[in-house]
Image (cartoon, coloured by chain):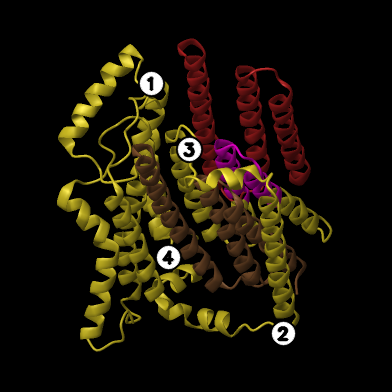
Chain colours: A yellow, B red, C brown
Amino acid sequence: MSPVSLPLFDALLLFSIVGLAWASLATTDERRSVILFIAFGLVLAVAWGRLLAPDVALAEAAIGAGLSGALLLGAVHRQPRPLSPGSTNDSRNQGATGMGVVLRWVVTLLCTALAGTLAWALLHAFSSVPHDMLPRAISGNLAASGVSNPVTAVLLNFRAYDTLLELAVLLTAVLGIFALGQANPGYQPAGPVFDSLVRWLVPVLILTSGYLLWVGAHAPGGAFQAGAILAAAGVVLRLAGRTRIGLPEGFMLRIVMAAGVGLFLLVGLTLLLLGRPFLGYPPAWAGSLILLIETAAMLSIAATLLLAFLGGRPESPAHAARTESANTTASNSGNEEQTRC
Amino acid sequence: MINILSSILILSGVFFYLAGSIGLLRLPDLYSRLHALTKADNLGLGLLIAGVALHSQDLLMMLKLLLIWLAVLAASATSAHLIARQARRQETGS
Amino acid sequence: MLTAQWMYGLAGCVIMALGLRGALLHASLLQRIVAINVMGAGVFMLLVAVAYRGPVLPPDPLPHALVLTGIVVAVSATALALALARRLHAEQEDD
């Protein structure tokens, strides 16, 4: 690539990214804001690819733009009017009062100052000689880590404790979602066009997620991307009005939700009992242990993200069957407002 | 030689994307915009992928790129259908 | 310092500030959630820009792992925030 075109490409890409972020936050229409945010996420994935971060690009496209976008669009669709915290809405929205305008300008100035401080710190940090102690340590120990993809090695071996805590954060979030209410109402059964797309798309998604899990050991991929694709298969099934979306029920659901954290802890404590440090895999077994943990983590992540899309405790099968028959008769008469897809 | 051919394909793909975006901005109503955008963008993607596929190392990579194009084709056609159907329902229903 | 590093780093700072301003000033809860996600994206861009070491050297994988963790945590926080918003809306309507 010629030396002049790459900075030009970077400038154009960054211009679109910052422009999309600005546009997403400048509009007052919620739906437009969410759609621009999805576009922002997708162009951001291109930026990750340009910065040689393919694992991050996969995760951003699947989770950051895809699943986040689905969550936000679902929320926009369900609220008939903009969501606001009660009485303070009017004073903030007006901006016509003196205090309102001053407040906006003060906040804007503070945020600009924050950006300036960060930029100054960044330039200051970059002006000194770059430390590459950590990257050298990672590439030096990569052979003993059990995988050859350095990001997977960092996530599942060198910093496995952080990943364990991250899975615990996911679990906590879904427990909070469970505590807040029942799942959102389902969608109408899909027409023939969407249904035939779903018929071949869902098996392809499941296959792709299995592939991403396996290939994460030596190429960009891994448990998080695989879990997100698997959750996307469930989301597509849900949008097509199916009641069975791949989630286990009752006790099995709890097992699957806890499987990620649980297996991680099991492996760690077993290693502790065998005299090794917590989550310190023996190099001969590291590859298999990582694959085992990643499989459990993938199922756990997929279940968690799908439950997050459902928005609450999933309904029981009997209730779901009644809802589906009600939706079918309602779609025949075409009057049902709430479950319009 | 391959570079020239792939550059031509990629540039024509970009042209179709541009045409689709102009159609999005200039056409009068939802249906015509949807029609122009879906058709032009899919064709543009096909040309883009053809241009990229010329640089691929082996047949497997070409096949993967072709599958990507087919998947995007099916998904965008379905979503265009869903959007148009919903717009139609909103027009005649409410 | 590489050109790409400071371009993307600067853009990351700007996006973070945009997101923070949106999170503080917007009236609608949903837009504030979007703004927090944008803020997170700015931080990620900062991290990945720091990790980039040019077209020849492989990038530093540690910030990539941090960003991957961050993306997943951000989506779960968004999901919880949306569930809270939905419950808040339902409670307000009951009043």
Which label belongs to residue A76? 3
On whether disc 2 and disc 1 are found on a single subunit, the reply is yes
Marks 1 and 4: CB-CB under 8 Å? no
**Near-viewer residue (A42 or C28):** C28
Residue A30 percent coordinates (x, y): 55, 39
* Nearer-N-terminus badge (2/4): 2
Residue B73 percent coordinates (x, y): 54, 30
* Nearer-N-terminus badge (2/1): 2
* Majority secondary structure in the magenta region: helix
Give the foreground label among 3 and 1.
3
Q: CA distance from mark 3 to mark 4?
A: 38 Å
Q: Amino acid at mark 3?
A: Val
**Near-viewer residue (A173 or B10):** A173
Q: CA distance from mark 2 to mark 3?
A: 48 Å
| Start-end of magenta stretch | A17-43
Name the element at disc 1.
loop
Q: Residues within 10 Å of mark 2 (few under 14, many from 20)?
A: few
Q: Is residue A211 visible?
A: no
Quadrant of the drawing holding the N terminus of chain A: bottom right
Q: Is residue A25 left or right of residue A242?
A: right
On whether disc 2 and disc 3 are found on a single subunit, the reply is yes
Which label belongs to residue A191? 1
Residue A289 vertical position relative to residue C30 in the rendered view, above or below: below
The subunit carrying tag 4 is: A
Residue A34 vertical position relative to residue A139 in the rendered view, above or below: above
**Near-viewer residue (A159 or B27):** B27
Q: Amino acid at mark 2?
A: Val
